[in-house]
Image (cartoon, rainbow, N blue to C red):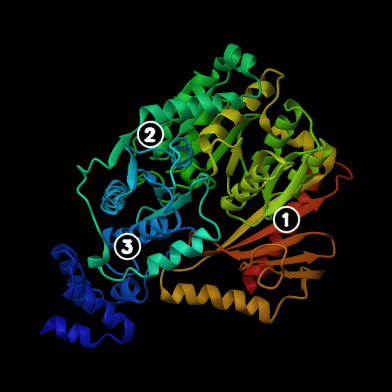
């Protein structure tokens, strides 16, 4: 009677979905959890069932738990069945289609990966399943190395512990893009019942475990990307590196890669070394945030390491903190990218076809430096799949550009083309090589950055995040805020007039996207977009300040301008 009364209080699609799960072919434990929410926590029940977890262009990502709007074995199986149907529909000429699957240290990641493997095998698709957790870039690499039609990575990147996700890659090792993303989404939407999912046992001969062979092939490949191979091998132990994997997958590959490059003097943030889906020392395991790196920063200064390298749970993003003049300096993603572009351009053979790619929210100094070295710089929307798309397009052209390096302000970088997603393993080796070169000249990475500012002017990138609840109300509030800015756009910021407003829902240069760019009279930019992975709106302040008297004064003036703009934005 109590359950019936609880159902009576629900309305519309929510009630329909709850009844379907309570009466359908779902396991008893799931049904008991739903009944408990119905009895004790109807608000969370509504959030869990008010919609169906969307399989979007980035795959699945959401809070774990029972419900149509949650990450669980049923939503993972449905997504995989849709993927299997799409593979058979588009790759019918391939006799033995295959998919690589990897997973990170999050709760249920291994179980979700095994569920996906069983579904693919049940659909007569061969599976290369990593036998243990591995970084995202290794899954992208495995997709290409094993000549798979697709790949799956079970991860929610740097989201808090309650989240998990499911990313899909196509045969080039890049996250799916049109037309494949739309085709997969359409097939996934057709799977509405557990009975539509075909599954094989884990003992199926179609499921093959992989590990050591892919690891070695990957390491041999990235070794070709060394900037200073002889110097790093001979002097690498002179650089004191502190490493944190933030309880994630990086521990399986980053130390091995660093050692291969010659960096053997590596210490660890021991409190964060053990892979752990609870992320006990970093609730938000994002290497962009000082709080996640707090323990490592303290050890960096106390024990006088040269730099701290930290990677997020799936090891596609990297954070770098430099000990400079006795203090810790946390490099932003844009600063890392700019330092890397300068070092790479000094070492590579010059070519008019050398191409560098950055997201629209990554520092304009990236472009300035690349072009100063006769490179060509391209802008893409945030999302590394757009960088990978450029690489694929150029490879298909007879006289295409040669991709060298790409980066995003959100601390994702890719050197070379062996993988087609952000690669924090390779990025760790790259920044270590540059830091060693600087140290041998009596400098730090901060000194290298300041030299670029003195040469080209000071560039400041400042991120403001407006956070929302992971709920129906939160998503509605996000949409309302963006609509308000479109309907009533500000005419100025801190007294500086807006000379141009670019709405990416209306222009044609980039794919249609929920992005607004306010260009001010002083050439500053304010870029506003909802996050693709978290319940927040990101506001990027991109300022340039000429150096009239000193770099320090330019930094102070830019910081004051950024603070004033942030204050005004929050008043909206």
Nearest to N terminus: mark 2 or mark 1: 2
Q: Residue 459: x, y in percent? A: 76, 48
Which residue appears at 59% of the width and 47% of the height?
A: 388
Q: Report the quarter where the N terminus lies.
A: bottom left
Labelled disc at residue 55: none
Q: Mark 2 falls on what kind of element?
A: loop
Q: Is residue 196 left or right of residue 88?
A: left
Closer to the eye: label 3 or 1: 3
Label 3 or label 1, whichever comes before in sequence order: 3
Assign the C terminus to one quadrant of the image.
bottom right
Q: Is 437 on the left or on the right of 18, as rendered?
A: right
* Total marks in image: 3
Q: Which mark is residue 542?
A: 1
**How far separated are the C-alphas under marks 2 and 1?**
35 Å
461 versus 17 height, above or below? above
* Residue appearing at x 66%, y 39% in the figure: 405
Residue reaching furthest left?
A: 1
- Of the image marks 3 and 2, the number of the one nearer the N terminus: 3
Q: Does 384 sit above or below residue 53?
A: above
In-front residue for pair 556/21 = 21
**Circle 3 sits in a helix, a strand or a loop, which is it?**
helix
Q: Which residue is mark 3?
A: 78
Q: Using a 10 Å C-alpha cutoff, classify the residue at mark 1 as few (fewer than 14 neighbours), some (14 to 19) or many (20 or more).
A: many
Q: Residue 266 appears at what percent x and percent y?
A: 48, 23
Residue visible at 55% across and 35% down in the picture: 418
Position above or below: 121 against 468: above
């Amino acid at each position: 009677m109590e359950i019936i009364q609880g159902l009576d209080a629900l309305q519309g699609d929510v009630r329909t979905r709850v009844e379907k799960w309570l009466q359908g072919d779902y396991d008893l434990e799931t049904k008991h959890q739903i009944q408990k929410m119905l009895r004790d926590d109807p608000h969370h029940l509504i959030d869990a069932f008010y919609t169906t977890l969307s399989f979007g262009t980035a795959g699945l990502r959401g809070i774990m738990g029972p419900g149509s709007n949650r990450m669980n074995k049923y939503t993972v199986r449905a997504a995989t069945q849709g993927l299997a149907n799409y593979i058979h529909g588009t790759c019918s000429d391939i006799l033995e289609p295959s998919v690589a699957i990897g997973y990170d240290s999050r709760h249920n990641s291994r179980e979700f990966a095994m569920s996906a493997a069983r579904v693919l095998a049940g659909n007569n698709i061969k599976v290369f399943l990593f036998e243990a957790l591995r970084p995202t870039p290794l899954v992208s690499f495995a997709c290409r190395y094993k000549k798979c039609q697709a790949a799956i990575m079970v991860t929610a990147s740097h989201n808090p512990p309650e989240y998990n996700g499911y990313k899909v890659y196509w045969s080039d090792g890049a996250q799916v893009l049109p037309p494949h993303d739309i085709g997969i989404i359409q097939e996934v939407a057709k799977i509405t019942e557990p009975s539509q999912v075909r599954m094989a046992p884990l003992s199926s001969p179609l499921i093959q475990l992989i590990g050591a062979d892919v690891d070695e092939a990957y390491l041999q490949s990235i070794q070709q990307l060394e900037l200073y191979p002889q110097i790093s091998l001979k002097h690498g132990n002179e650089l004191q590196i502190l490493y944190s994997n933030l309880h994630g997958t990086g521990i399986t590959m980053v130390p091995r890669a660093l050692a291969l490059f010659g960096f053997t003097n590596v210490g660890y943030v021991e409190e964060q070394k053990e892979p752990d889906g609870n992320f006990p020392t970093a609730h938000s395991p994002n290497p962009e945030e000082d709080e996640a790196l707090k323990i490592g920063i303290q050890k960096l200064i106390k024990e006088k390491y040269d730099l701290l390298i930290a990677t997020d749970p799936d090891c596609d993003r990297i954070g770098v903190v430099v000990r400079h003049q006795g203090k810790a300096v946390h490099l932003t993603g844009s600063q890392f990218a700019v330092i890397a572009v300068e070092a790479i351009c000094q070492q590579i053979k010059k070519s008019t076809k050398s191409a560098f790619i950055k997201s629209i929210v990554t520092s304009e100094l990236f472009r300035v430096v690349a072009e100063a070295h006769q490179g060509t710089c391209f802008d893409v929307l945030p999302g590394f799949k757009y960088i990978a798309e450029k690489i694929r397009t150029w490879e298909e052209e007879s006289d295409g550009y040669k991709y060298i390096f790409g980066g995003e302000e959100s601390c994702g970088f890719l050197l070379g083309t062996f993988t087609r997603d952000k690669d924090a393993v390779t990025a760790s080796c790259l920044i270590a090589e540059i830091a060693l070169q600087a140290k041998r000249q009596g400098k730090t990475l901060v000194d290298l950055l300041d030299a670029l500012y003195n040469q080209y002017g000071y560039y400041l990138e400042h991120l403001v995040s407006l956070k929302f609840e992971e709920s129906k109300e939160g998503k509605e509030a996000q949409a309302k805020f963006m609509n308000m800015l479109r309907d009533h756009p500000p005419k100025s910021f801190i007294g500086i007039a807006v000379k141009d407003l670019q709405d990416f829902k209306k222009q044609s240069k980039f794919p249609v996207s929920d992005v607004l760019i306010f260009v001010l009279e002083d050439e500053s930019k304010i870029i506003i977009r909802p996050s693709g992975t978290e319940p927040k709106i990101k506001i990027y302040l991109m300022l340039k300040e000429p150096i009239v008297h000193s770099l320090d004064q330019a930094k102070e003036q830019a910081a004051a301008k950024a603070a004033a703009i942030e204050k005004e934005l929050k008043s909206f």
